[in-house]
Image (spheres, rainbow, N blue to C red):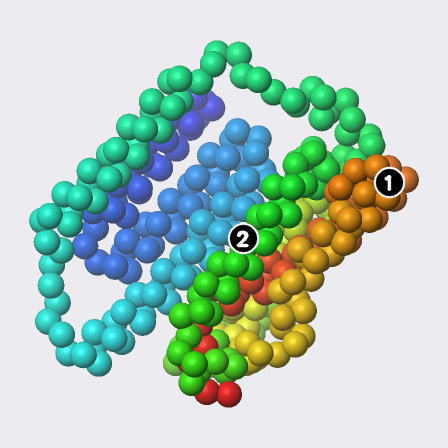
Amino acid sequence: MTPVLFDAGLCVLILGVALASVIVREAFAAIAFFIVYGLLVAIAWTRLDAVDVALAEVAIGAGLTGALFVGAMSRIAQAAEAQAAPRRHPERLAVVGALLLCGGAGAALIFTVLQLPEVAVSLASLAEANLALTGVTNKVTAVLINFRGYDTLLESVVLLVALIGVWSATPDRFWGGPPGLQLAMTQDSVLGFFGAILPPVGFVVGAYLIWIGSSAPGGAFQGGTVWAAMLLLAVLAGLIDPPLVSKRSLRFGLVLGPALFLAIGIAGIFRGSFLGLDPPIAKTLTLAIEVGLAVSIAATLALLVIGKPRRAA
């Protein structure tokens, strides 16, 4: 199969799976199509030589988001059984409103793309010329930590704020207890089996992605996401219990990445610029930031999926 035919077939599959995930009636089937869609998009990013984006898509789009949807579906089913409410089909007005909203967003994106200048304004050449000063050879890591450090720092804070928003929905009588992920599972089940054997391997893979991120596709976000998935798997397998949300070690892990990044950034002021890294030790500082961010990302994403506390401490 020629590359052109492969890419054309991939585009058709992506559109078909995306459409199927929207129009299918069964919730579990829609989630399955969504996960497949994430995997296909990751392949598309790989074909575009954006391996870092492909890794993030697999971890987030097909991994944690799929797990979040499965958990939400389970809780909705439990709530429906408890209330014994009759199942209602979506009203036509809601369906029409959703279609109009999606159509309008799609039209806005198409219009925006068509308005883009033919010759894009880019700082890529300037960044590439100063790549040696960053201490790393992976251009993506260099851009994220050195050339757009403000954005990366704020993104790590946004994740933490999202978790605080989830926790703020917790009733006062439950505050301080463990997060509320509950799943009845036996050790001899498929999920229980993989939950027992995969976490050690996954933690090594996550550490490797963080380490290799300075010279090849990888980094804090990809490695931290893999760690988050392994934490969730270990919780679901019953190997570990979700920690109390009031536990100091948990809170330390949540703020480690942003706090370390901010501290190194403030130290850069004494060298002439906020978030500036001294070239002789830039690689060491970058690795320290990546490890701290990975710990915070792993803890935050895992707790976002697990949800708010549900039991009193």
Residue found at the far top of this picture: 118
Instruction: Report the amino acid beneath label 2.
Output: Val
Rendering quarter of residue 17: top left
Element type where label 2 sits in the image: helix
Between residue 191 and residue 239, name the one nearer to us. 239
313 or 287, which is in the foreground? 313
| Visible residue check, residue 301 | no
- Left/right of residue 271 with respect to residue 161 in the rendered view: right
The span from disc 2 to disc 1 (Cα, nearest Å) is 27 Å
> Horizontal and vertical percent for residue 223?
63, 54
Q: Residues within 10 Å of mark 2 (few under 14, many from 20)?
A: few
Task: Classify residue 85 by image quadrant.
Answer: bottom left
Amino acid on which disc 1 is placed? Arg
Q: Which badge, 2 or 1, comes first in the chain's sequence?
A: 2
**100 relative position to 284: left or right:** left
Front of the two marks 2 and 1 = 1
Q: Is residue 249 above or below residue 265?
A: below
Left or right for 139, reference 95: right
> What is the x, y in percent for residue 130?
78, 26
Task: Bin the neighbour count of mark 1 within 10 Å (Cα to Cα): few under 14, some 14-19, many 20 and up.
Answer: few
Q: Position of residue 118 (x, y in %)?
A: 48, 11
* Disc number placed over residue 271 in the picture, else none: 1
54, 132: nearer the viewer: 132
Look at 25% across and 33% down and name the residue there: 104
The residue singled out by tag 2 in the image is 158
Residue 259 in the image: above or below residue 167: above
Q: Residue at x 28, y 53 (%)?
A: 30
